[in-house]
Structure formats: C-alpha cells, structure tokens
C-alpha cells in the first residue's frame, strides 16, 4: 500500500510541477510579446531596420495576466540597452516588473570616402554610404547623402569617418562685410536700399545688416547678395 501511495504522491507532484512550468512559460511568452510590440510601435519611425532583443530570463516567476501594460520608466530612452516596465492590473493579481531590452538600428550611414578638409565643399566623390548600427556610432550621423553633397565641412573629416549633422553647414550666400541689397516688399509696393552685412549667412538664414544711415536691420539671406525684409 505504501509504494502505491508514494507513487500517487510523486505523480501528483510531477503534474503540479508541470502545470506550474507551463503557466510560467505562458506568462513569459505574453510579457515578451507585449514588450516587443511596445518597443516596435515606439521605434518604427527610426531610419533603417530595427532589431529588438527582449531578455526573458529575469521574470519567469511572474503570475499570468491578461491586462499587461508596458511603459517606459521615467528617464528611460528607447535606444541601445534599456528597460521596459510592465504592469499587471488584474483583479486577481497586481505586479510590476522591468524587462531588459536591447535594440540595434541598422541603416545606411554617410561616411567620408577620403579626407575632407575644414571649409571644403563636399562632392559626391567625397562620400560613401555604408551600413552601420546607429546605436554604436556618434549621435546625429547622417543617413541621406543629399543632405551632405554641396555642404561645407565645419571640421576635418578623416577617411571612413561617419559624417554628423554638426560637422557640415550650408554654403554662405552672404559674407561678413559684404555690400548687400536690402529689399522690403508688401502689397503693392517694393523698396530697396544698400547695406553692409554684419555676419555671414546661408540661404534662408537671418542676417543683420547696417543700412546707409547706420540703422541695424534683420532680414533673410538670399542668393545674389539680397537680404529680404519681411513686413
């Protein structure tokens, strides 16, 4: 009789253990999916291909929940390695846990194909596009070659270096000290006079000009040494 009782007890324990493991696996899968869906929705605007890795080994003890609420903790950033919080607000159970996540953002990044000197106008021959993980390279890396060609380098760029937004600028259409034409126009009228630019400016940038009587006027830099005064 005792062997039979022992066998029944062992089978009962085994079934209970199997059910517990299945329940934990189900909870883990649900949490992983909720976190993955949340991160995907929040990062789909990023350029290139986003790869999401959710690490499930830290929350196997969580109880099953049918109302999972993923959230980004205060100060969190969906970039590189970070954590996503998950809340359960069931009537039967309530818990909060934090899930480690890592993302990679693979995109075509503009690199210097050869050394580029400061002040040099960048041409198509000066650059090359290469795939890179945006998470592992400096911020503001440029992905569109159109944003680089025709721009001026503001710093020396070594061959193979990713080009960042602050390392280039638009070509100046007005130079400091240049004689410019101030043009003010409105409905039914247009007035022009000469002045001297107090700073260099690219197309569309604001620039200050000293007119013939010494007054400082601000306007918009245009091609051909023109500064547009909007009324």
Image (spheres, rainbow, N blue to C red):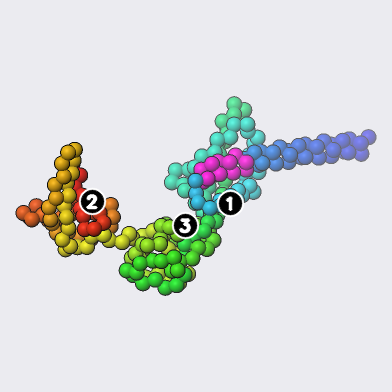
Residue drawn at (69%, 38%), measured in percent from left and top?
26
Locate residue 94: give its quadrant: top right
Q: Position of residue 45 (x, y in %)?
A: 49, 46
Magenta segment boundaries in residue numbering: 32-44
Magenta-colored stretch includes residue 62: no
Q: Nearer the viewer, mark 2 or mark 3?
A: 2
Principal secondary structure, stretch drawn in magenta: helix
Q: Position of residue 146 (x, y in %)?
A: 43, 57
Residue drawn at (36%, 62%), measured in percent from left and top?
151
Residue picked out by circle 3: 143
Q: Secondary structure at mark 3?
A: loop
Q: CA distance from mark 2 to mark 3?
A: 29 Å
Q: Position of residue 88 (x, y in %)?
A: 57, 34
Residue picked out by circle 2: 220
Magenta-colored stretch includes residue 33: yes
Q: Mark 1 vs mark 2: which is more N-terminal?
A: 1
Residue 51, label in figure:
1
Residue drawn at (39%, 58%), measured in percent from left and top?
165
Q: Secondary structure at mark 1?
A: strand
Q: CA distance from mark 3 to mark 1?
A: 18 Å
Residue drawn at (45%, 68%), measured in percent from left and top?
125
Q: Mark 2 vs mark 3: which is more N-terminal?
A: 3
Front residue (pair 116, 76): 116
Q: Nearer the viewer, mark 1 or mark 2?
A: 2
Q: Is residue 29 above or below residue 134?
A: above
Q: Nearer the viewer, mark 3 or mark 1?
A: 3
């Amino acid at each position: 009789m005792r062997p039979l009782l022992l066998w029944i007890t062992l089978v009962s324990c085994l079934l209970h253990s199997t059910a517990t493991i299945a329940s934990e696996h189900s909870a883990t899968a649900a949490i992983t999916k909720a976190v993955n869906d949340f991160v995907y929705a929040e990062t789909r605007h990023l350029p290139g291909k986003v790869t999401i890795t959710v690490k499930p080994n830290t929350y196997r003890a969580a109880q099953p929940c049918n109302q999972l609420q993923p959230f980004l903790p205060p100060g969190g950033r969906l970039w590189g390695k970070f954590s996503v919080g998950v809340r359960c607000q069931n009537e039967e159970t309530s818990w909060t846990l934090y899930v480690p996540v890592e993302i990679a953002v693979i995109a075509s990044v503009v690199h210097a194909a050869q050394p580029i000197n400061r002040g040099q106008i960048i041409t198509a021959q000066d650059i090359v596009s290469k795939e890179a993980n945006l998470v592992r390279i400096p911020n503001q890396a440029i992905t569109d070659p159109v944003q680089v060609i025709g721009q001026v380098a503001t710093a020396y760029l070594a061959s193979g270096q990713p080009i960042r937004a602050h390392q280039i600028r638009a070509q100046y259409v007005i130079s400091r000290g240049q004689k410019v034409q101030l043009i003010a126009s409105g409905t039914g009228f247009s007035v022009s006079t000469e002045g001297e630019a107090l700073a260099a400016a690219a197309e569309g940038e604001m620039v200050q000009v000293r007119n013939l009587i010494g007054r400082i006027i601000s306007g918009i830099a245009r091609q051909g040494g023109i500064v547009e005064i909007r009324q």
